[in-house]
Amino acid sequence: MVVILLGPPGVGKGTQGAFLAEDLGWVRIATGDLLRSARREGTALGKKAEEYMDAGELVPDDLIVALVRETLEGLDTDTGVLLDGFPRTVPQAIALEEMLPEVDRAVDAVLLLEAPDDVLMKRISGRRSCPESGRIYNVYFDPPKVEGICDDSGRPLLHREDDRPETVERRLEVYSELTEPLVDHYDASSTPVLRIQGDGELDEVRAAIRRALATELGVEVGSR
Ligand code: AP5
């Protein structure tokens, strides 16, 4: 199966995607995480992506499509896949539709997480993440046991460069200009779009996603 996690910056795609990947034993392909690790490693892709990311702009479609293709090609076809942060433009969605049959897959559903901008801004301002374990925290809603330190790796937590308020505003604009049209794209297709209210508490959103996947796709989350 392939499920796309769609929604604005800060809505909880990474957080809920990590829960789901663990509960289902699926692979989560998060293009933002892949790009951040390419930057840390100083690869050619990381260097090209840097200025777009720090300005809150999207990285060019061709670079992202090549990255996702390479990642998908390396996976066992039996493994379920959660796409987090991809596709993010209509051309990326079309490229995905062309590439999936080549790896014997198709998109089963889009999980659309939604929340108002003031909730997104508050969440992003409090976000801290661990570059080693990948775990995401929030100083207001989900803090680590020891301030500034990852519970799992013991490493210092980072505040993302693109989480500065002025960059977040641009990321929200880019979402509404380039990514929101994807909702119409999928609504007009045969792929079900499962709308989830993302502004509840962590466990409420997690439960809503489980219900939607069970009802719409027959996927029982938590049965593992
Ligand atoms: P990316 O890393 O994908 O960022 P994003 O989509 O902007 O999403 P975020 O990571 O900001 O938020 P999220 O929805 O994952 O929320 P999270 O779970 O962390 O992309 C970064 C950049 O990379 C892009 O700007 C672009 O430049 C580039 N890029 C990536 N993919 C690309 C593509 N396909 N094409 C082109 N460019 C691409 O949660 C946020 C915070 O809220 C956390 O602190 C969390 O603990 C907290 N939280 C979550 N849920 C709740 C809740 N229910 N209650 C309280 N707090 C909560």
Image (spheres, rainbow, N blue to C red):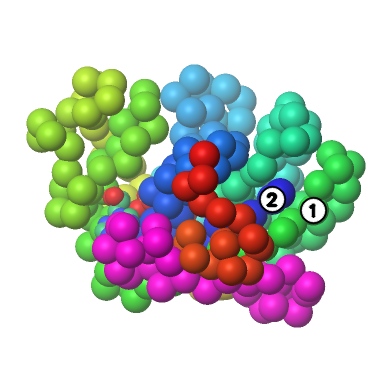
Looking at the image, residue 73 sits to the left or right of residue 215; the answer is right
Q: Is mark 2 within 8 Å of ligand 1?
A: no
Image height check: is 154 above or below 134? above
The residue tagged 2 is 2
Label 1: how many Cα within 10 Å (few below 14, some 14–19, many 20+): some
- Along the line of sight, the residue nearer the viewer: 118 or 60: 118
Could you tell me the amino acid type at mark 1? Answer: Ala
Quarter occupied by residue 71: top right
- Along the line of sight, the residue nearer the viewer: 205 or 93: 205
Image height check: is 88 above or below 84? below
* Percent x, y of residue 113: 47, 66
* Percent x, y of residue 88: 61, 58
Q: Is mark 1 within 8 Å of ligand 1?
A: no
Label 2: how many Cα within 10 Å (few below 14, some 14–19, many 20+): some
Image height check: is 3 above or below 201? above
Residue at image location 64% in from the left, 60% down from the top: 218
Could you tell me the amino acid type at mark 2? Answer: Val
**Under tag 1, what secondary structure?**
loop
Looking at the image, residue 78 sits to the left or right of residue 84; the answer is right
Image height check: is 190 above or below 80? below
> Does 96 lie within the magenta span?
no
Q: State how far apart marks 1 and 2 are (Cα).
A: 6 Å
Q: Which mark is residue 106?
A: 1
Q: Is mark 1 in CB contact (under 8 Å) with mark 2?
A: yes
Instruction: State which tag comes first along the sequence, 1 or 2.
Output: 2
Quarter occupied by residue 207: bottom left
- Quick check: can you spot residue 172? no
Residue at image location 17% in from the left, 37% down from the top: 144
* Percent x, y of residue 137: 26, 43
Residue at image location 28% in from the left, 21% down from the top: 153
Magenta-highlighted residues: 181-208
